[in-house]
Image: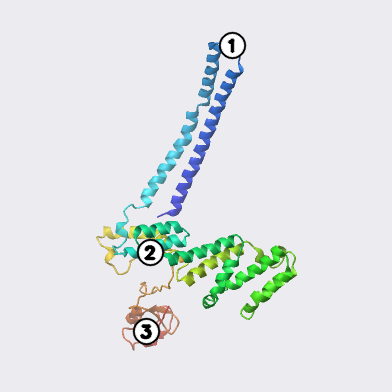
């Protein structure tokens, strides 16, 4: 699927539509203007002295001007260009998107309850609580009140942060202090740092800011020796936005902190920071064109790819969807598996176990590395673990 081509075709349609709309509006305005002028002329004339001849003359003059404007002729050209662009876009859509995708996936027996829970989870994590409640009620699933209340708390914290109120976030971070430390997260320190800067800027009280630092930043001093002195240096500047520490007053600090809070909140909750439903659909959207093309090729060869344990072609999806390390043997060009794990040779090169067995032909026979002059025996190779 050529997404770029589709985008360009769509942009051409939008451009032609905008041009057509502008032309239509100009023609309408011109017609309205001529009509209003004719009405004004009729109203200005003395009705007592105006005869039918004068009335007909004004209308004839209006008709002549409208014929001169020729609005239909003006619009015909741009409308034709819009129709051509729209026709090309529809043809490209039909060519790029196969309406029958049933052959591009295996028939899998899904558990309806699991799918419903995933959908309800998606609604709640997006903050669509009423929609989530309606869905749970209509599909008759078990109560999701714990998940709902947790995400309601998260969105309450985020709304407070949008209003520049850090108290709910600080309270949550203090309650989950130990778990944040286990995650190696600096979220609590960053929240206190931002609160320190807010006191310094909004209240203008260096003494109050210093007292806050002693109370709340002090416990982090032994773990973050580099960050705390930089914060304390803010006390000597009257205009932080013009100081070497202007980053502390940047609006992006709030955005980044909100994103990190979402990530840590979901992690402690045992949820991924991204919606599983959204990830699955987005990854499927990227992989579907390859599967559709594979289906057509395999059908021409009268073969069924659904029966294969491994796809004959790689599915190219973005790095944001790659959660686990994948090793593809450079010799056999096959993805590793539990039965065929990656092996590290003494020289530092890695190949699959099957490659080593084929190269050595026995456990004691010496074989040459396929990438360098080094030699080894199978017993010297160690299995790599990801």
State whether residue 226 is above or below residue 74. below
Question: In the image, residue 246 lies at what x, y percent?
Answer: 68, 65
> Which quadrant would residue 115 be assigned to in this image?
bottom left
Front-lying residue, 221 or 216 = 216
Question: In the image, residue 217 lies at what x, y percent?
Answer: 64, 75
- Name the residue tied to disc 3: 367
Question: In the image, residue 240 lies at what x, y percent?
Answer: 71, 65
- Name the residue tied to disc 1: 48
Residue 161 horizontal side relative to residue 269, left or right: right
Q: Is residue 263 visible?
A: yes
- Name the residue tied to disc 2: 117
Marks 1 and 2, how far apart in space? 80 Å
Tell me the quarter of the image containing the N terminus. bottom left
Q: Is residue 296 visible?
A: no
Looking at marks 2 and 3 on the same chain, the residue that comes earlier in the sequence is marked by 2
Judged from the image, the secondary structure of the residue bearing numbered disc 2 is helix
How many numbered discs? 3
Q: Residue at x 44, y 70 (%)?
A: 323
């Amino acid at each position: 699927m050529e997404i770029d081509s589709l985008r360009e075709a769509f942009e051409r349609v939008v451009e032609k539509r905008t041009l057509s709309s502008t032309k239509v509006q100009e023609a309408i305005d011109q017609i309205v203007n001529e009509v209003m002028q004719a009405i004004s002329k009729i109203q200005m004339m003395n009705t007592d002295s105006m005869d039918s001849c004068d009335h007909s003359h004004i209308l004839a003059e209006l008709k002549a001007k409208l014929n001169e404007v020729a609005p239909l002729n003006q619009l015909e050209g741009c409308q034709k260009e819009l129709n051509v662009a729209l026709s090309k876009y529809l043809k490209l859509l039909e060519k790029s998107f196969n309406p029958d995708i049933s052959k591009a996936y295996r028939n899998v027996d899904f558990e309806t309850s699991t799918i419903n829970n995933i959908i309800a989870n998606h609604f709640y994590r997006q903050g669509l609580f009423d929609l989530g409640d309606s869905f749970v009620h209509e599909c008759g699933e078990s109560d999701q009140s714990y998940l709902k209340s947790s995400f309601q708390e998260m969105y309450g914290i985020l709304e407070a942060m949008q209003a520049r109120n850090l108290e709910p976030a600080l309270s949550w971070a203090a309650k989950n202090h130990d778990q944040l430390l286990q995650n190696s997260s600096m979220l609590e320190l960053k929240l206190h740092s931002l609160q320190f800067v807010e006191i310094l800027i909004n209240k203008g009280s260096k003494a109050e800011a210093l007292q806050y630092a002693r109370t709340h930043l002090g416990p982090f001093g032994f773990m973050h020796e580099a960050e705390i002195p930089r914060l304390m240096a803010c006390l000597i500047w009257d205009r932080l936005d013009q100081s070497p520490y202007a980053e502390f007053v940047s609006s992006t600090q709030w955005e980044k902190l909100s994103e990190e809070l979402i990530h840590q909140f979901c992690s402690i909750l045992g949820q991924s920071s991204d919606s599983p439903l959204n990830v699955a659909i987005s990854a499927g959207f990227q992989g579907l064109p390859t599967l559709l093309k594979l289906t057509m090729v395999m059908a021409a060869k009268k073969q069924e790819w659904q029966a294969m344990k491994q796809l004959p072609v790689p599915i190219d999806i973005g790095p944001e969807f790659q959660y686990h390390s994948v090793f593809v043997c450079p010799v056999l060009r096959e993805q590793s598996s539990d039965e065929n794990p990656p092996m590290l040779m003494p020289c530092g090169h890695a190949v699959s176990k099957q490659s080593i067995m084929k190269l050595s032909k026995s456990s004691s026979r010496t074989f040459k590395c396929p990438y360098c002059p080094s030699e080894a025996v199978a017993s010297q190779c160690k299995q790599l673990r990801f």
